[in-house]
Amino acid sequence: EATGEHEMGLNELLAGVRVAGVVCNQWGDTGKGKVVDVLAERWADIIARGTGGANAGHTIVCNGKEFVFHLVPSGILHDGQGKVNVIGEGVVLDPHVLVEELNQLDRAGLSYNHLRISHESKLVLPHHLVLDRAREFKKGIGRIGTTGRGIGPAYEDHVARRGLVVNDLLNRDVFLQKLGRALEGAQRELHSMELDGETTREIFNHPLLLNGRFYHSTKLFDGEAIAKTYLEEYGKRLAPFISNTSAFMRAALGKKNVLLEGAQGLLLSVDHGTRPFVTSSDSSINGLARGVGLRERDVNACIAIAKAYMTRVGSGPFPTELGGRESEAHCNDHSHDREFERKEYAHVNVNNGSELEKGIALRVKGSEYGATTGRPRRTGWLDLVALRHAMQFNGSLLFLTKVDVLDAFKEVRVCTQYEYAGPDYNYGGSMLKSGDVLDFFPADSKVLECVQPVYASLNGWGTPTNGIKTFEGLPVELKNFIQFIETHAHGKVCGLSNGASREDVIFF
């Protein structure tokens, strides 16, 4: 149940607001789904997703039961109260994943009667997943580290004007015509990769590709099997929920409380992130609004989520990573189970051992394993240089998550600047030289991989924060941590989460 303090802080925060957005100011995995779930219950009438696809993983704990959604908006748990959940036109939608999520809701006895799916959502097809996985295989050591969910290839088809949309599931002849054209290009690319037969079959033999159902020994793709599955299984199941959601959203402006749910994070935005190690959509508030048929100026409040520390999944530069390149290699080589099973990690502690071991301890304590892939997330200290960069695009309101994960730390470090330690490099018309101190975040990965963090050291609070319900009740060291963030990131911390439960949220 929401406490009086919670309601007071939330009501003050959203006073006069009709459209609010929840986005991430880091590399994703910051707990957006939990905040969306809380706001959906206490404030919103409509909850809408507008970017990304099944590469997003939002975990919500409700009544002791954990739900993981990849496509369905996090407000779906409140469908029974008449809340409308919308999958917008900017989303790339894998119907197999969505149907599985609806089945999950069925098994839990939860309704989704008010779900709406944009007829213009981009359709993820089997060739997108195959291309995604094949490209990562061919890149080998230089791979980007995608989730293998077909997101990039689906957006590529959209931009190249050969993609299919959800509405095509309702029109058989159009679907078949478009599918044939799309498969021709995919077949050409796969043939050019010169993969051996065993590797090709392994790529096709994946649960998301229904364990080889769409594989053809000579044509590679079995178009008939794809059409049958998509039209007869997915199309018929999803047809009742497909509609013009952009028109619905615009009609709701000024009349309903609208909550926009972001996916991934600003540092992964295709426009503002650490290219090429980014996702394929704009995960800023601007991209989110556009993806549901609205304009950025329609959004009255943007709540940007940041962990009290940093994590990153997959490849790409990470200046504050505990253990540095050793940590990145470790995470690429370990699964969740392996990290828990290996006895040499049983002793790791957040206050002792090597930087790598501290990073492992932080990961275990924070349960930092991908909701979509299960991959270990690389962990590190909070980076205020990156946070300032994100706030240029997502506004000044910050919400801190997983504060309780740092409860046992005797010292908490925060990055305030970078020192460049690479070769001379022309960046934006200025020549960077080794030893230069940077107050800005260089989205160019060639620069970012050559910077060293400049840290400020703060006292840890050393006491459990779970169960505290007000800002006044927080330890003074945690209040100092919050004030330090506000001062150096030039923003306002409007709340925090201090536990895994949906009740462990404070707004102030």
Image (cartoon, rainbow, N blue to C red):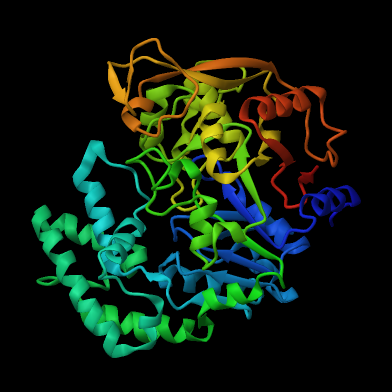
| Above or below, 483 relative to 231 | above
Residue occupying the point 12% across, 53% down: 193
User: How many dots with numbers?
Assistant: 0
Residue 177 showing in the rendered view: yes
Residue 351 falls in which quadrant of the image? top right
Q: Is residue 362 left or right of residue 451?
A: right
Residue occupying the point 62% across, 30% down: 489
| Quadrant where the N terminus is found in the figure | bottom right
Q: Is residue 367 left or right of residue 147?
A: right
| Above or below, 350 relative to 225 | above
Q: Is residue 130 left or right of residue 318?
A: left
Q: Position of residue 2 (x, y in %)?
A: 84, 55
Residue 388 falls in which quadrant of the image? top right
Seen from this angle, which residue lies furthest right? 4
Seen from this angle, which residue lies furthest top? 435
Q: Position of residue 239 (x, y in %)?
A: 47, 85
Give the camera-side residue of 128 and 365: 128
Residue 104 showing in the rendered view: no
Residue occupying the point 63% across, 33% down: 308
Q: Position of residue 172 (x, y in %)?
A: 31, 89
| Quadrant where the C terminus is found in the figure | top right
Q: Position of residue 240 (x, y in %)?
A: 52, 86
